[in-house]
Image (cartoon, rainbow, N blue to C red):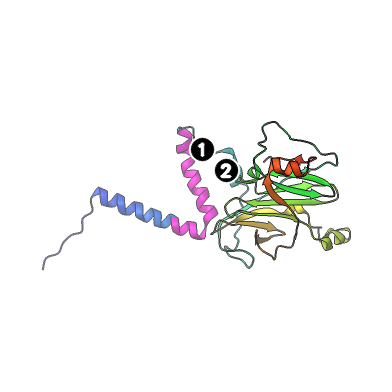
Amino acid sequence: MRTHAIRFNGKQIAKYGMVGTLVGICWLANFHPAWTLDRIQGFIAPIASCFRVGPSRVYDAALTNRDVRPVPMTGPHHKRLSMVLELPPLGPILVEESPRQLESASVDPHQLVVGIIFEGRAVAIPLQALTGPMSHIAVLDFGELQMAVTHCSLSKCTRVLRLPEATSVSIQESTPEIPRPKLSDLKVGGLDIEGGLVLLFQDTRYSQKSPELPLEDCDFEIMPLLRWQEKHPGTSVRTPQP
């Protein structure tokens, strides 16, 4: 009876080793996405620095703010997460009673904006300013009221939110043991497997589209800035900055 020894050459070892490595990375990414992304970036960073490329300042900041606590990848208010984050909103951006015109001549009058009107004050937020890795939420401060503009460029979803009226009344009755809710507590909580934005509010994650999100929707319009200004000549343009 003949026996055949199994021999592997260098190319086969490299091929099977690469396949095994990719399978291992995919398995880790499925169960521990934040940990896997950190390790991958840590491995790539020294190589990239030799060629004077990446990672950029924005992605470094995103990593330092990533929520690395163990959290369920699925929840009652969102689909399975592909990335877990905990990023604070931009702002608050003060909207004065006396409207301010274009912040700079570089603002493209044909770009899309989120237009909001509150007590006669018209404000426009360039949609492009809410498409960065850390720029999906911007809080507007009208003095007696705050609104949060949320936008996801992947799912093409935009919502403008505020604290509900009942919460505004109960703020005066808050105690040190039960801190009053603030709109600045609304954070980017991650990304689901379908590319949808997940919001984090009061330690609970919600899909941006979730009707269970305990905030009230506000009226808004999306249109080119030039058209919005024709409808509301006293518009104040605000560009959120990371």
**What crowding class fits label 2: few (fewer than 14 Cα within 10 Å), some (14-19), or many (20 or more)?**
some
Any magenta on residue 28? yes
Q: Within the image, what quadrant is residue 129 found in? A: top right
Picture coordinates of residue 226 (x, y %)?
Answer: 70, 40
Instruction: Please determine whether, in this image, residue 108 is positioned above or below residue 173.
Output: above
The furthest residue to the left:
1
Q: Is 53 left, or right, of 149 in this rendering?
A: left
Residue 164 visible, this angle: yes
Callout 1 touching callout 2 (CB < 8 Å): yes
The span shown in magenta is 26-50
Give the mark nearer the N terminus: 1 vs 2: 1
Quadrant location, the C terminus: top right
Question: Please, what secondary structure does the residue beneath circle 2 have?
Answer: helix
Estimate the x, y position of residue 67 in percent, counting from the top left: 62, 53
Q: Which residue is mark 2?
A: 59
Q: Which residue is mark 1?
A: 54
